[in-house]
Image: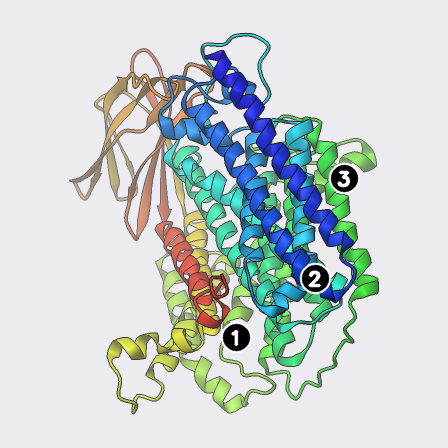
Amino acid sequence: MPEIGNIIGIAGHTALGVSIASSVMCVLLGISSKNTTELAVIYRRQQSLVILIFIGLVVSISLLVYSLATDQFALKYVVEHSSTQMQIWYKIASLYSGQAGSLLIWTFAISLSTLLLSRTRTAAFQYRGLNAITLLALIILAFLFPLIFLSSPFQLTNRVFTEGIGLNPLLVDPTMLIHPPMLLLGLASTAIPFAISLGMIISRTASTEWSQSLRRWALISLLILSAGNFLGAWWAYTVLGWGGYWGWDPVENCAILPLIPLAVLLHSKPLQERLGLFYTWNLMLGCLPFVLAIFGTFNVRSGLITSVHSFAESDIGPYFLGLLALTLLAPAVLLSVRTGVKPMKHNYDSVLSIETGLIINNFLLLSIGLVILGGTLFPVASELSNGARIVVGPLFFADTVGPLLAILLFFMAFTAPLAWTKTLKKNYVKRIKFPLSLAALISIFAAFLGASGFINVLAIFASVFGVLIHSFEIYRAVTKNTAIKSSLYDRAFRPFKQNPRRYGGYITHIGLAVMAIGIIASTAYESRNRFTVEPGESFSVGNYSFEYQGLWGQKPETNGIEIEAGTEITLLENNQIVNILRPGRRFFYSAPNQPVAIVDIDSNLIRDVYVFTQGWNEKQVAEIQILIKPLVQWLWIGAGIYIAGVLVSLSARDRSILKNL
């Protein structure tokens, strides 16, 4: 009913108005504080205003979700992104399929993080939390402005609609129910390290409490953003039909860029905590992830770069360019004049120390980040300089980032057994000798099995060495002090309880190395074949045989899908039936000329048989593409190990985010 839609539109704008008014008051309260006697009172008032901001955004999101779920086509957003044919979960997914909806989730996620931060009750937070909460309220205000004045999700239509366009066909997949909100939440969460770092700069403080909080929130952002990227890679692999999981698309690059300074910060913080080094550097690293998140948001909405992930060019692009300039310049200017902490000097007793390893690893991480950023912006720079846009393709990134990642894996592995200040050479050689020799033997064996190319074999060696050395370090910790009577369970988990930061980091590094093995094997040694066959014909790829049985088809009549059709193929190995595969195409009412792939994959730990049907004719002659991708499942296993390691690092009770709630 249009009347309900009109009421929802008014209520939604009112809820956003409550949030924007509360944000303004929160900012003004922070600016107006002048002396320490009133800070605690103002902080408590800000806490109440943060709750109001959050409630306003919860109400606005709830109203939009209700509108999508009940087909309130009086709202323009519902018309453009939902339809009556869609299942309820995909109607809710429409919340983040459009520009206004994704911005609303961004703002909600920042307000949720702000609420969690504001509930911290320690004295250090009450005394110094004012700056961070004020900055976060200002950020929320900056995001609310376009939601109300430039791209409102509650804008009403000027005529009556009984049906909507529906969800983007590429988003009609279960993974897309999780991937976009996870990625948006991860990008939004980088606002907290930004506000904490900038707040520390403004207050000229080196508070240990705030320093720990910066690390904690950096870990949370790393966790969520990494999970979002992994889910995106899985979606690309299982839906798009090209057999890859990362295409170095400009928007994909923008999603991964904030991870680089987060990782550098987490590896640089120990140098500050133990030796007092890199305080200013770490504050800058705390600000950079949010700057890069805004950069990605600007790219997606400005039309600056061409990407399949981009929204249409709109008035929001220039707005976010201004926001990007502000978030970049403010920390840079303030860092130059307000750090208030004298830099400390450290005399290295030995180059063979963990300090050296961390610095080299950080340098390599930054180099990778700069290459990705430079490659992403190069087409724009070339167009500005000579009027011709020179596209930087995936091959450039593979040839530059790939070797850098291999070198990074080497140094990560060599750093693991190092001690602070000085490592005895004899002990160090003893600890790396066996895993290094075993990694060399495994690499030789891989080459014997068919691994070729110097860089590929070197990367395999670095990855295997990384898995082995970190595993051996964990084993050493588990078997240490075996004279102490304890159960096997207690001994196995003692290192992770006593030092979750170190051993959680080791698990994360193992996950990265396992992922690298999956990436190297599945890209460098994959087999791609294309066949044109008639029903009843057979064809072979290596040890695998395929029998094309014919076409299949059905009419789901849901989620905007008109027809699903494809080929039925029997997969045999050693003349034994392994699986019946049914790859094909999905055709939508809203985009009949833009079918979406239906990929079918037979997976095990050794290989994936990836089958995609390119097309067929009226005589059922089909063009079928077969990809054999070795060890690709280890990419997803490594991602799971990586996530587990980050969770272990967050598990320290004295550093838990829930400690002071």
Is residue 332 visible in the rendered structure shown here?
yes
Point out the image quarter for the N terminus.
top left
Q: Are marks 1 and 3 in contact (CB under 8 Å)?
A: no
Q: Are marks 3 and 2 in contact (CB under 8 Å)?
A: no
Indicate the secondary structure of the residue bearing disc 2: helix
Residue plotted at (51% across, 60% down) = 454
Q: Earlier in the sequence, mark 3 or mark 2?
A: 2
Q: Earlier in the sequence, mark 1 or mark 3?
A: 3
Indicate the secondary structure of the residue bearing disc 1: helix
Q: Amino acid at mark 3?
A: Gly
Q: Residues within 10 Å of mark 2 (few under 14, many from 20)?
A: some
Task: Please tell me which residue lies in front, 59 or 167.
Answer: 59
Task: Kindly identify which numbered label has been placed on residue 414.
Answer: 1
Task: Please tell me which residue lies in front, 118 or 264.
Answer: 118
Task: Kindly identify which numbered label has been placed on residue 322.
Answer: 3
Q: CA distance from mark 2 to mark 1?
A: 48 Å
Q: Amino acid at mark 2?
A: Leu
Q: Residues within 10 Å of mark 3 (few under 14, many from 20)?
A: few
Q: Earlier in the sequence, mark 2 or mark 1?
A: 2
Residue at the left extreme of this rendering: 576
Which residue is identified by label 2?
Answer: 39
Indicate the secondary structure of the residue bearing disc 3: helix
Q: Which tag is nearer the camera, tag 1 or tag 3?
A: 3
- The vertical placement of 409 against 66, above or below, is below
Q: Amino acid at mark 1?
A: Phe
- The vertical placement of 199 against 232, above or below, is below
Residue plotted at (67% across, 26% down) = 313
Residue plotted at (76% across, 61% down) = 202
Q: Which tag is nearer the camera, tag 2 or tag 1?
A: 2
